[in-house]
Image: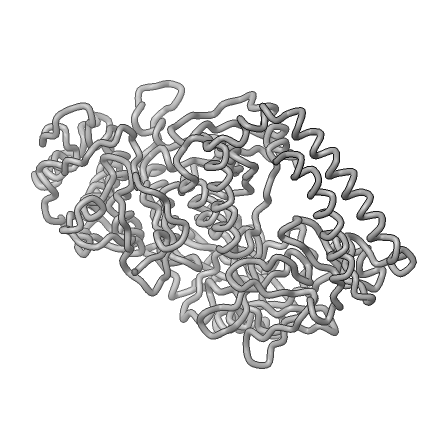
Amino acid sequence: MLKLACFLLPLFSFFNRSASASNSTSSSTVCPTYNCADGLKIRYPFWVSHGSPPDQYCGYQEFGLICSDQGGYPIFSLPPGLYYRVADIDYDNHTVHLIDVDTFNQTCPRALHKVPLGNLPLSHSPLNLNLSFHYNCSSHPSDASPITCLTSGVKQSFVFVTGNETEGFDWSNTCEESVVVTVMKDGITSEGLMNEYREAMNEGFILDWQTAKSCDECEASDGICGYSNTRKESLCFCKDGSVQSNSCSGRSKARLSKPIIGLIVGGIAALLTCILIVSLRRKLSLILSAEFWKMTNNDQRIESFIRNNGPLTIKRFTFSEIKKMTNSFEVKLGEGGYGRVYKGITIKNCPVAVKVLNASKGNGEEFINEVVSISRTSHVNIVTLLGFCLEGGKKALVYELMPNGSLEKFIYNRKLETNPPLSWEKLLQIAGGIARGLEYLHRGCNARILHFDIKPNNILLDENFCPKIADFGLAKLCSKTHSKVSMLDARGTVGYIAPEVWNRNFGGVSHKSDVYSYGMLILEMVGGRKNVNEESSYSSDIYFPHWAYGQIESGNKIIGYDDITREESEIAKKMILVGLWCIQPMPSDRPPMNRVIEMLEGSLDQLSIPPKPFIFPPTIPRTGEENFATNGVLSFSADYQCGR
């Protein structure tokens, strides 16, 4: 059998090379013009992805467009997973007109992010200008006019043409968030900004495109640049019908000799392959074991799933790059059931946290969830995913580094000198930041994201103790048009799981399940202890929400801190009331996250006492791990759709 293979391989190589040489197709047939919307032609250097990138296409690799199911208009994705509606493309002047999907056609748009161009062959048009938004400001100059519809409690929000802010006033220290967005100059006048910014954001902005670096040589030789997803390399479509790797220069002279060269090279390669197979057949038999094929098949499914969820705009690293940035995994930051986290430095001297997933951990569900879901987000309270690595069985995720680590070490170890307790004001700010991050996941981004694992060690703190939601390993994506999730499994961490997740008699699983976990989280922030002692039998004595409710109901001094001031006691009481509202057993009784934000920022007098929570916390089946999800085979398609 082996000898037969060695005989056939050179023949196969010959016919394969000959077929490739004769299968030259003109650029007009492989570079079609697409129609996504009426009157808008999509052609080179743009190309259309119908669910997943085609095996071979003409166009710049970064310029893949997605045809929207709603309205038929094309969508352009910019890193890190931000989506823009393509209003027009001017091929003569090399400009593209984009509109932010996150704020389009909203009565009171709230700018969420800047326009991220990175290293893309794009630049801002001279027709644009920038607007600076400052949100939830505790103070402001007397001559500044707030955006009325974005006022939240006593805090106000403002917008200016960038550079025209009040001179000498530091907005960064008085406002919780600042965002710069791009609009067109002709939509803004010097006096009517407050009435014009909404329409200007709806009109979008203009970007100019230049030749992509990877296509310089091809276009210089009068070719059309493209890409092969199967071979993972650039292509150059030439006028003579041939397809080259870099350029069309000198193609016509060498055209007749290429099949012969290909035959020789292919024959030698096949012969060497046979020799290698014969000499290493014992080792080969071990490599071709059932476990190897199982892993390879699973990795192919992961690749397919990522490809089918649209073009990813985050960087893909090789494993050698991962080893280099972590100095061969020298500094370990943490470890869990998923794997280990190491400190790293990128080539641009940016500190990062690298999560290396266990090769034996499940069949790729957590890896897929994090890459696909978090790459679609951009928010000050969501940790930024910078890239990923998928190389055989090696999987890694590269995040921005959070210098202060997780919230967990600051709320459970109040007496440790290494982690002094946070002030009550800071705890309230952190609770508000987490709420805004969840509000963004549920309503602010292009697809609704349900996290399903909100807990203190999944909240990371930057150098200013700004909270960022992390670890999207159990997350699910769903359409905003569906309020409930079709889910075959319970998922989450014991002590934070909403009742409906493990028992459907309480109602359907939805974004309100994250609200429940958030409520348990802020109760722990107040109490400085876990709500549920998993090692004890459940009772009202160790169920903190029940004890906290008694404190509120009786009007006693909150918690038992001897040195707590009246203002601090009011903050603690407000957080307890919000937490108790969030952990109501029926999802319909819990407030949505936008209402939670209003409750945290509003007056304590406006908060009513919620119904009493469970006297005993629900008993949840143990699975041998803190986190649990499906024990069945992961579905890479239907299991991740919502509302079915």
Drawn side of residue 224 relative to residue 528, left or right: right
Depth check: 471 or 357 in front?
357
Q: Which colour scheme appears in the figure?
A: one colour
Q: Compared to 209, does 139 lie above or below?
A: above
Quadrant for residue 426, please give it: top left
Specify the quadrant that holds the C terminus: bottom left
Q: Residue 132 placed where, x, y %?
A: 54, 58
Depth check: 131 or 210 in front?
210
- Residue 234 visible: yes
The residue at the far right in this view is 253
Quadrant for residue 352, please give it: top right
Specify the quadrant that holds the N terminus: top right
* Point 43% across, 62% down: residue: 146
The residue at the far bottom in this view is 39
Q: Compared to 144, does 175 lie above or below?
A: above
- Residue 440 visible: no
* Point 74% across, 60% down: residue: 225
Depth check: 19 or 474 in front?
19
Q: Residue 72 placed where, x, y %?
A: 50, 74
Q: Compared to 170, does 333 lie above or below?
A: above
Quadrant for residue 181, please give it: bottom right
Q: Residue 500 placed where, x, y %?
A: 19, 48
Q: Residue 200 placed where, x, y %?
A: 54, 71
Drawn side of residue 341 relative to residue 95, left or right: left
Depth check: 501 or 607 in front?
501
- Give the total number of marks visible in the rendering: 0
